């Protein structure tokens, strides 16, 4: 994981705002790095954007949930039936609890998204 001051500041802000949301964000970030070890992250659009060869997903914290978002989510195989969104390309997986990080099979979506690029 990189030592980006903007990433550190956003994590700090989330820690002050809501520890439970922070825990979901951190678990999701750790899973992304475990699934795509070459990933890098930067703060963009108010969340964490992950890239390998190109951007493949983003993690965004909201008041009551965390969203794992895919710019080309329309091209993902939704085997677990957890993708949401009806836009032309984008899809997201809503994480309401720490248990959702495991229960919603995120790794398969992260890997698929990274392999699209």
Image (tube, rainbow, N blue to C red):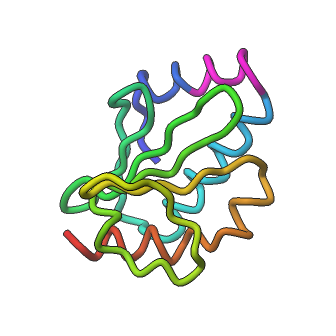
Seen at 54% across and 45% down, the residue is: 67
> Is 97 situated left or right of 74 in this image?
right
Residue 67 is one of the magenta-drawn residues: no
> Is 29 situated left or right of 38 in this image?
right
Q: How many numbered discs, if any?
A: 0
Q: Position of residue 103 (x, y in %)?
A: 74, 70
Q: Position of residue 115 (x, y in %)?
A: 28, 76
Q: Which residues are magenta?
A: 11-18
Q: Position of residue 74 (x, y in %)?
A: 31, 67
Seen at 62% across and 74% down, the residue is: 105
> Is 34 situated left or right of 49 in this image?
right
The answer to which quarter of the image holds residue 4 is: top left
Q: Position of residue 75 (x, y in %)?
A: 29, 73
> Is 85 situated left or right of 11 in this image?
left
In depth, the one of 109 and 94 nearer the eye is 94
Q: Is residue 10 above or below residue 54?
A: above
Seen at 40% across and 57% down, the residue is: 91
Residue 14 is one of the magenta-drawn residues: yes
Magenta residues: mostly which secondary structure?
helix
Screen quadrant of the C terminus = bottom left
């Amino acid at each position: 994981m990189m030592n980006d001051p903007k990433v550190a500041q956003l994590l700090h802000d989330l820690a002050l705002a809501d520890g439970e949301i922070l825990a979901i964000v951190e678990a999701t970030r750790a899973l992304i790095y475990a699934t795509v070890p070459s990933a890098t992250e930067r703060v963009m659009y108010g969340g964490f954007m992950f890239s390998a060869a190109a951007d493949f997903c983003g993690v965004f914290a909201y008041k009551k949930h965390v969203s794992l978002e895919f710019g080309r989510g329309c091209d993902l195989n939704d085997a677990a039936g957890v993708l949401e969104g009806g836009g032309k390309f984008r899809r997201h997986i809503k994480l309401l609890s720490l248990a959702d990080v495991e229960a919603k099979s995120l790794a398969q979506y992260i890997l698929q998204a990274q392999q699209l690029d």
